[in-house]
Amino acid sequence: MTKALFTAATGMEAQQKNVDNIANNLANSSTVGFKRTRLEFQDLLYQNLRTPGGAANASTVLPVGLQIGLGARAISSERIFQQGDFKQTENPLDLVIEGSGFFQVRQTNGELAYTRAGSFHLNAEGQIVTAGGESLEPAITIPTDATSITIGTDGTVSVTQPGQTNAQTVGQLQLATFANPAGLNSLGRNLFQETAASGQATVGSPDANGLGRINQGFIEGSNVNVVEELVNMISAQRAYETNSKVITAADHMLSTINQAVSG
Amino acid sequence: MNFGLYASYLGMRARQQRLDMLANNIANASTSGFKADRLLYRSVAASENDPVQTQTVQEGDAQLTPVKRGVDVGVVTSQATDFSQGSVRDTGRALDVSLEGDGFLCVQTARGERYTRQGSLTLDQSGQLVTPQGDLVVGDGGPITIPPGEVSIGVDGTVSSNGQIAGKLKIVEFANPNQALTKEGASLFAATGKEKAVEASNTRVVQGSLEMSNVNSLVEMVAMMQNTREFESMQRSVSMLMNDIGRTISSELGKL
């Protein structure tokens, strides 16, 4: 019966992680480019108390055995790369990727990172950078006297300058895809990092080879569905409660034994 | 009197095992593809498990058997898994599949082929379809490699990416899964070898949804309350047998 106590504890721990995860999703329900995560659970080991097929007596075998499981655990937090809602902003440096792919940015420590959060800004040198200051890779510099910036669906960045009638191309955006985007490591700050599980980044121009199209003047909202998260939270809370009831029941049975012994 | 005590002990032990099992069901109320376990009680005849009790005692000409054959003195337990369909939840994720019907997905592990109903599949670094544990999902022609792009999975398990067929999920079923499968943990079932897996005939694959655990918390809670009360009654009978009857006999015998 002490088994039941520990089994219930694993269930409570799993549900606690579940609530932690829901809390993070809800906290990021307004984060641009945020992708929600979902916890996946699995059952733990089973204890074989009676093996099916064992001999019940000389002539019959047990048709079914007795296996008692030892609880549950959270096995993975699966990031769901479903497209978030697009919001129109009219800001020329707000970009969304319609389809698969990530913007490739260079962090201040020199390492590459990937993001879906396409609200870019210009830094003091005129480079296109994220809100966190990470520059696009390859870097694109906008001339200081540019009067307008146009980014095409294929990622071509062009500007118009005073005294010129034709737009001038100043760079080309590149997008990256992965064999397994769910295997990317989340760095926080809307950034993801390549891992052995995600596979190597395949870099290419937008709107080709299965990569998404760029839309200028939009941002991709978080893909967290608040109602769904709240429903998940209620069910996690109930499951947590039920697990705690198991502990109460086990405790009650143990005290019953104590009464039998003392009585 | 001894048999009564022993029967109560067996009953209490069975209730303990039941609580352990209920605890595991409840702990897995959020495990997708989990199948609840049920404890089965079976009465034991005194003679069945204890050869000592079948010995007869010679007393004069009469042969006395301490306990008549066929008298039940307690319970032993075994377990059966409830393979009924869990509720299906819409997730919208392309690599989530739920199975409508009695089929199982086949998974290649280091220990051999295993079966699962947990359909939250993912890809590995080379684009092969795997479980969250990293075990390869078996297709009709080996592992399924999915090139980047929009993945669609048909009702028959055909996996395609950007219109190109990448493979077909191998889905098998068993006539009597309770005999054919044992639980291995990590949402996997292992074959006992009693029955050969056959290709599933009536199972539909539904993309973008997950089969939840088939544990019904309400049912488990009620079972748990009933279980606790039964345990208490058995404890009552133990203390009755130990104190009341025992004391009565010794006091009555003392008068003789």
Image (spheres, coloured by chain):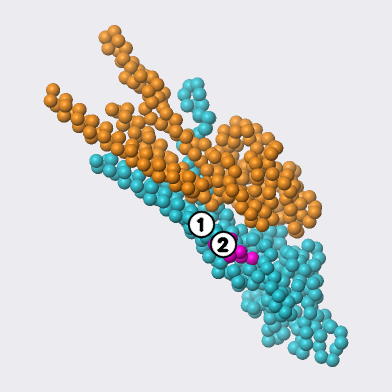
Chain colours: A cyan, B orange
- Percent x, y for residue A131? 64, 78
On screen, residue B2 above or below B121: above
Q: Is residue A226 magenta?
A: yes
Q: Residue furthest top?
A: B61
Q: Quadrant of the N terminus of chain B?
A: top left
Q: Which residue is mark 2?
A: A229
Whether residue A136 is visible to the viewer of this picture, yes or no, is: no
Image position of A15 with respect to B78: above or below: below
Magenta-highlighted residues: A223-230
Whether residue B215 is visible to the viewer of this picture, yes or no, is yes
Give residue B6's quadrant in the image: top left
Q: Position of residue A225 (x, y in %)?
A: 61, 64
- Amino acid under label 2? Glu
| Apparent side of residue B68 relative to residue B148 in the rendered image (left or right) | left
Q: Amino acid at mark 1?
A: Ala
Chain ID for label 1? A
Disc 2, SS:
helix
Magenta-highlighted stretch: main secondary structure?
helix
Query: Residue A163 at x, y = what percent?
Result: 84, 91
Q: In 3D space, how far apart are the residues under numbered discs 2 and 1 (Cα atoms)?
A: 10 Å
Of callouts 2 and 1, the N-terminal one = 2
Residue topped by disc 1: A236
Q: Position of residue A22 (x, y in %)?
A: 54, 62
Q: Chain of mark 2?
A: A
Disc 1: CA contacts within 10 A as few (<14), some (14-19) or many (>=20): many
Name the residue at 64% across, 72% down: A32
